[in-house]
Image (cartoon, rainbow, N blue to C red):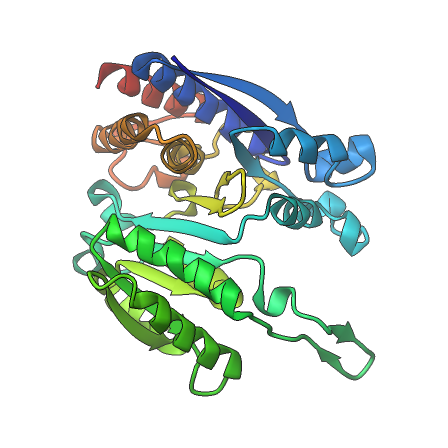
Amino acid sequence: MNRYKIAIIKGDGIGPEIVDEAIKVLDAVSAKENFELNYEEYLMGGCAYDVKGVPLPAETVEGCKNSDAILFGAIGGEKWDNLERHLRPESGLLKLRSELGVFANLRPTNVFDELVDASTIKPEVLKGVDLFVVRELTGGIYFGQPREKGIDRAYNTMVYTKEEIRRIAVVAFESAMKRRKSVCSVDKANVLEVSQLWRETVEEVALDYPEVTLSHMYVDNAAMQLVRNPKQFDVILTGNIFGDILSDEASMISGSIGLLPSASVGGKVGLFEPIHGSAPDIAGQGISNPIATVMSAAMMLRFALNENNAAERIEKAVQMVLKDGYRTKDLADYGAKEVCSTSEIGSIIADYVAKI
């Protein structure tokens, strides 16, 4: 029997609620597929600041580095908004990513047929959408130096090295090889020298993947095309700031950010989390949607533990649950036969996992 050590970071707001349901589903699938998951819980975010005085305690970093994977909920909230930048919850997450060396953010966007009316985009445009955003996570303008804010002038610097571009491009092409063998690299090479280097390097990497079709698109056009015809995309490869914006846009295609997972990989240990925030306004009410976290757990099984059958079992269970009309409050207006609490939908998914 395979045994894995999983670091659990529940975080703030609805984080504890949604992670608890993902663990419930993981326990069901591990029993069915005959492997063992051992969980160790750590603090990060506002809750860590309240207890330890810092958003990322040293023991969290050490525990995560000694795990096989990390399942994370969400962090942040107005309670901590006035703290100095290095003490805010979000700084803890950025530091953890840096400590882990993860450089690739993976965000799948799939549109469930049962929820095609939940989006503001026409159903005929959405039906069949299945795209995969590969975003570079540790370089670009968010981290470039120098940076400064003055009274009348501020600046940031966009920097990418050839090696940083090469390694994220490899992730995208490897992902495409497991999908429909198409990569669209998004940049702004018509005005940015950084993007010119990006495009040149991506084309070099493409030579190693002759089966994959490579295309290029300027980021402004990509933003438009995601709404106009999202089905044209298979794997979207892009840098940090462009990927931040485009992946959020892509997430809204599905109609609810409560459905979509993400993974941060490339280092020794991967970090798996829903794309949404901590939603402190609904924390403790039992109405949050845990499906994105459950699907993040499925990504963890696939990308970190190589338990592909277990990942597929969870994904099929979620699809069946939605097909049978079970919804949380955020999706109550879209084909709901029964509106469920956070805990109830988690239990139903776990039951379906056991039945498949």
Horizontal and vertical percent for residue 117?
25, 50
Q: Which residue is drawn at 62% across and 34% down?
A: 65
The relative height of residue 317 versus residue 262 in the rendered view (above or below) is above
Quadrant of the image containing the N terminus: top left
Horizontal and vertical percent for residue 31?
36, 12
Q: Work out whether residue 17 can be spotted.
A: yes
Q: Residue at x 58, y 63 (%)?
A: 139
The residue closer to the viewer here, 294 or 258, is 294
The residue closer to the viewer here, 295 or 160, is 160
Q: Is residue 145 left or right of residue 6?
A: right
State the residue lying farthest toward the left. Answer: 124
Q: Is residue 252 left or right of residue 232?
A: right
The residue closer to the viewer here, 292 or 219, is 219
The residue closer to the viewer here, 200 or 115, is 200
Q: How many marks?
A: 0
Q: In which quarter of the image is residue 312?
A: top left
Q: Residue at x 51, y 70 (%)?
A: 162
Horizontal and vertical percent for residue 144?
65, 69
Q: Work out whether residue 119 can be spotted.
A: no
The relative height of residue 70 versus residue 346 in the rendered view (above or below) is below
Horizontal and vertical percent for residue 93?
64, 45
Q: Is residue 268 left or right of residue 57?
A: left
State the residue lying farthest toward the front. Answer: 208
Q: In this view, does 312 lie to the left or right of 249?
A: left
Q: In which quarter of the image is residue 99?
A: top right
Quadrant of the image containing the C terminus: top left
State the residue lying farthest toward the bottom. Answer: 191
